[in-house]
Image (cartoon, rainbow, N blue to C red):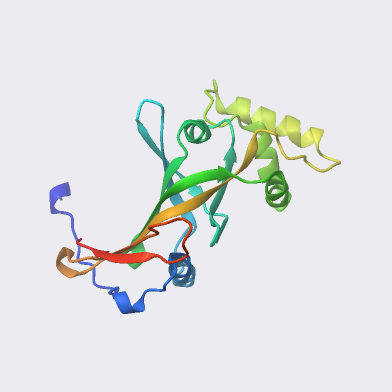
Amino acid sequence: MKLSDMRREYALSALKRKDLAVNPVDQFNLWLQQAIEFGLNDPTAMTVATVDEHGQPFQRIVLLKNVDDQGFVFYTNLGSRKAQHLQHNNKISLHFPWHAMERQVHITGTVEKLSAMENIKYFTSRPKESQLAAWASKQSNRISARGVLEGKYLELKEKFADGKIPVPSFWGGYRIKVESMEFWQGGEHRLHDRFIYVKPDQDKTEWDISRLAP
């Protein structure tokens, strides 16, 4: 089959203005809970888009680790490519592709680094293997072979065999302060339902909600 012939109808559900929560975080949490109950693989996986100093966009998938009215949180190596981009341009885009439910959520905003206490709290909650991996990988740096990475991991595993693993100084989290949040529900004949929340003034608590053409 040609790629141009591959298509399907979206008919699982519809999204109406009257059914939307006043706060987009509440709406997101509802959809996230439904995605979990639906049995989606990796429902917290999100595409994170950043832009380098030349205006070149980059995307990668990371896991959402917390969400509340303060924003969306993820963790990474602070020397990684995404972290370097955010150091020069703190604007960011998140995308949740919940294909099986014919849903998407798109978020734009700016990032701020988490506090040392927040980083420590999350890092110490991770499995020991994940803590070691954070130390072993100089994320986004070129390496000659996988064996280099595995060798460093085993070296660190032996080093910290009898004690707690400290939080690396080059590792931490970001909080995305939401500027807009769009909810997309697939519709028949490509007449999808799209609603976007925008806060006209960051000092206000009210969100403007608009329907967008598909």
| Residue 112 rendering spot, x and y as whole percentages | 55, 44
Count of numbered labels shown in the rendering = 0
Q: Residue furthest top?
A: 144
Q: Identify the image quadrant of the C terminus.
A: bottom left
Q: Is residue 89 above or below residue 185?
A: above
**Horizontal relation, residue 193 to residue 181: left or right:** left
For image coordinates 33% across by 66% down, the residue present is 209
For image coordinates 35% across by 30% down, the residue present is 55
Can residue 2 be spotted in the picture? no
**Horizontal relation, residue 71 to residue 53: left or right:** right
Q: Is residue 186 above or below residue 70?
A: below
Q: Nearer the viewer, residue 137 or 193?
A: 193
| Residue 166 rendering spot, x and y as whole percentages | 77, 39
Can residue 57 be spotted in the picture? yes
For image coordinates 54% across by 32% down, the residue present is 80
| Residue 206 rendering spot, x and y as whole percentages | 43, 67
| Residue 195 rendering spot, x and y as whole percentages | 30, 65
Q: Nearer the viewer, residue 159 or 97?
A: 97
Q: Is residue 143 above or below residue 9?
A: above
